[in-house]
Image: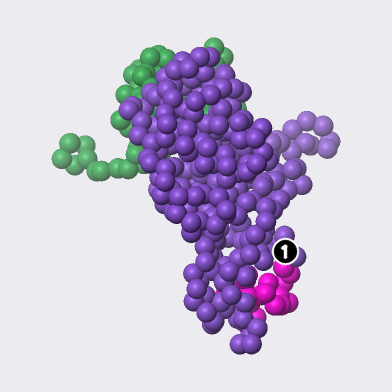
C-alpha cells in the first residue's frame, strides 16, 4: 500500500492489529499455553510493580516471545520504545517512563484480549 | 413543588477500607475496574452511590413506593400515580487525596494543584491561594513533614523520587483539610499534615492510574482443591485512606403536602447533619467500602468547616 493509500487508524486499531498478528504467530509456533498464561497476568504485573520491574521479570523468566510481541505492538504507536523494551523502560526519563508505562499497559491489555479472543474462537465462541 | 431557598453543604469521604465502586465488566486488563472520570481518568464516587447509602442509613425503605414523610421528600419515590423526585441533590465525589506508598512516613496523602483548585471551587473556599509547582519533579509539603529524611530532602513515592520543599500554601491546605476531616483530634490532624504532599498534575494522574489496588481472585475447584481452569480475575479498589469531596444541596422541595412542607435547611440538617459511618460500593461482605462521611457548611466564605 502506498503512502497515499494508507488509511488513518486510531492507536487502538494499530495496537489491536499488531497484537493479533503477534499472538497468532505464537499460536502457530507452539508453546502457546505458557505464553497465554503469562500474557493474562502480565498487565496487572505492570500495574502492581511498575513497567521496568515487570519487563525485567519477563526477561528473567525467558519470556522473550512475549516481550518481542509487546515491543511490536508498542512500535505501532508513537511511544519512544526502542527495539529493546527492557532497556527503554530502564533508561527513559520520568515523563517518558510514565508515557511508556501507560502505552505498555494498553499494549499488554491488547495482547491479553487477543489471547482470550483466540480461546473463545477455538471453543466455538465469537472471535 | 415548594420553596426555592438554596441550601448547600459539602460532603467529605474518608475511606476506612478499600472501596470498589465498579464500572461493570472492564474491557482493559482489569476485569472489574473502578469507575473513573472520562476527562481526567481519576477515580471518583458517583453521587447516586452516596445518595443511595445515605437513604439506606436513615432506614429509608428500598421500596420507594413505601417511602413516607420527609424520607420521601428527601430521596424521592416512584409509583404509578404518586411519584416525585428527591429534593436532595448529591454530586459525584471528586478525589482529593490519594494515599501512596512512601519510603519515609509509610504513606503520603498526595494531591495536585488541579485537585485543590477543583476542591476550592466545589466548596467555595476563597481563602487558600492556589499551589503552583515549579516543575513535575517536585513536591510541596507542610512544615513538619514525615515524608523526607530532612527538610527539603528527597521524597520516595512508589517508584518516583521527587525533590521536596516546604510551601506555605501547601501548609494552609493541609491545615484546612485536616481541620475539616479531623476537627479537634490533634493526633490525626498532625498525622495528616505530616503526610500531606502536593505533586504535579501529571504525576498525580500517573499515580491515580498505577496507584490503585489491583488484586487477583480465583475460584477454587471443589474437586481438585486448586484454582478452577479459567477462573482468574482481577478487581480494582480505591485504597484505604483515600479522601474525596462532593456537594449536596437542596433548592426545590418535591412531593411535600402543602401544609407540612419542610424547608431546604431542615431537610439537609435531618439527613446530612452529623458524621455518618457508611458502606459504599460492592464487596460489602469482605469488608470493603467502609467510609466516614462528614458534612460541612460551605456558604461561609473563607472557612471549610462549620
Residue B39, placed above or below residue A39:
below
- Residue A122 in percent (x, y) is at 57, 40
In the rendered view, tell whether residue B89 sits above or below residue A76. Answer: below
Q: Which chain is green?
A: A
Give the camera-side residue of B122 and B37. Answer: B122
| Residue B194 visible within the image | yes
**Image label count:** 1
Q: Which residue is mark 1?
A: B58
Q: Residue at x 57, y 39 (%)?
A: B178
Write the residue at 30% across / 30% down.
A78
Q: Work out whether residue B91 or residue B82 is closer to the camera in this orientation and state it.
A: B91
Image quarter where the N terminus of chain A lies is top left
Q: Can see residue B282?
A: no
Q: Which segment did they paint magenta?
A: B60-86
- Residue shown at 38%/23% (left/top)? B137
**Color encoding of the figure:** by chain
Q: Nearer the viewer, residue A111 or B112?
A: B112
The answer to whether residue A7 is left or right of residue A66 is: left
Q: Colour of chain B?
A: purple
- The image shows residue B37 at horizontal and vertical percentages of 46, 49
Q: Quadrant of residue B70?
A: bottom right
Q: Position of residue B71 (x, y in %)?
A: 68, 72
Amino acid at each position: 500500500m502506498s503512502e497515499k493509500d494508507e488509511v488513518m487508524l486510531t492507536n487502538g486499531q494499530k495496537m489491536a492489529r499488531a497484537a493479533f498478528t503477534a499472538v497468532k504467530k505464537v499460536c502457530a509456533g507452539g508453546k502457546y499455553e505458557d505464553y497465554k498464561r503469562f500474557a493474562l497476568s502480565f498487565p496487572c504485573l505492570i500495574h502492581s510493580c511498575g513497567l521496568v520491574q515487570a519487563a525485567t521479570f519477563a526477561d528473567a523468566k525467558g519470556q522473550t516471545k512475549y516481550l518481542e510481541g509487546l515491543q511490536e505492538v508498542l512500535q505501532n504507536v508513537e511511544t519512544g520504545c526502542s527495539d529493546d523494551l527492557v532497556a527503554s523502560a530502564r533508561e527513559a526519563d520520568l515523563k517518558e517512563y510514565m508515557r511508556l508505562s501507560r502505552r505498555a499497559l494498553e499494549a499488554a491489555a491488547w495482547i491479553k484480549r487477543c489471547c482470550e479472543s483466540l480461546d473463545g474462537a477455538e471453543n466455538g465462541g465469537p472471535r | 413543588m415548594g420553596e426555592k431557598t438554596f441550601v448547600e453543604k459539602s460532603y467529605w469521604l474518608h475511606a476506612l477500607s478499600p472501596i470498589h465502586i465498579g464500572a461493570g465488566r472492564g474491557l482493559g486488563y482489569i476485569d472489574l475496574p473502578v469507575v473513573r472520570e472520562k476527562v481526567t481518568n481519576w477515580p471518583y464516587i458517583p453521587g447516586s452511590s452516596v445518595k443511595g447509602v445515605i437513604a439506606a442509613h436513615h432506614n429509608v425503605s428500598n421500596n420507594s413506593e413505601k417511602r413516607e414523610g420527609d424520607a420521601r421528600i428527601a430521596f424521592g419515590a416512584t409509583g404509578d400515580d404518586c411519584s416525585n423526585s428527591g429534593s436532595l441533590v448529591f454530586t459525584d465525589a471528586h478525589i482529593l487525596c490519594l494515599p501512596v506508598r512512601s519510603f519515609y512516613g509509610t504513606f503520603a496523602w498526595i494531591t495536585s494543584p488541579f485537585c485543590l483548585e477543583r476542591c476550592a471551587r466545589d466548596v467555595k473556599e476563597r481563602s487558600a491561594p492556589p499551589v503552583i509547582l515549579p516543575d513535575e519533579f517536585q513536591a510541596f509539603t507542610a512544615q513538619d513533614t514525615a515524608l523526607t529524611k530532612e527538610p527539603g530532602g528527597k521524597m520516595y513515592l512508589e517508584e518516583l523520587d521527587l525533590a521536596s520543599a516546604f510551601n506555605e500554601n501547601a501548609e494552609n491546605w493541609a491545615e484546612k483539610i485536616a481541620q475539616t476531616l479531623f476537627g479537634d483530634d490533634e493526633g490525626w490532624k498532625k498525622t495528616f499534615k505530616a503526610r500531606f504532599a502536593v505533586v504535579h498534575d501529571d504525576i498525580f494522574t500517573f499515580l491515580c492510574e498505577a496507584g490503585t489496588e489491583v488484586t487477583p481472585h480465583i475460584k477454587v475447584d471443589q474437586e481438585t482443591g486448586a484454582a478452577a481452569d479459567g477462573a482468574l480475575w482481577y478487581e480494582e479498589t480505591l485504597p484505604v485512606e483515600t479522601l474525596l469531596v462532593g456537594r449536596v444541596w437542596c433548592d426545590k422541595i418535591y412531593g411535600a403536602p402543602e401544609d407540612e412542607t419542610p424547608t431546604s435547611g431542615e431537610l439537609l440538617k435531618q439527613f446530612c447533619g452529623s458524621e455518618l459511618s457508611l458502606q459504599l460500593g460492592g464487596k460489602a461482605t469482605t469488608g470493603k467500602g467502609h467510609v466516614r462521611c462528614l458534612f460541612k457548611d460551605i456558604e461561609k466564605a473563607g472557612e471549610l468547616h462549620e
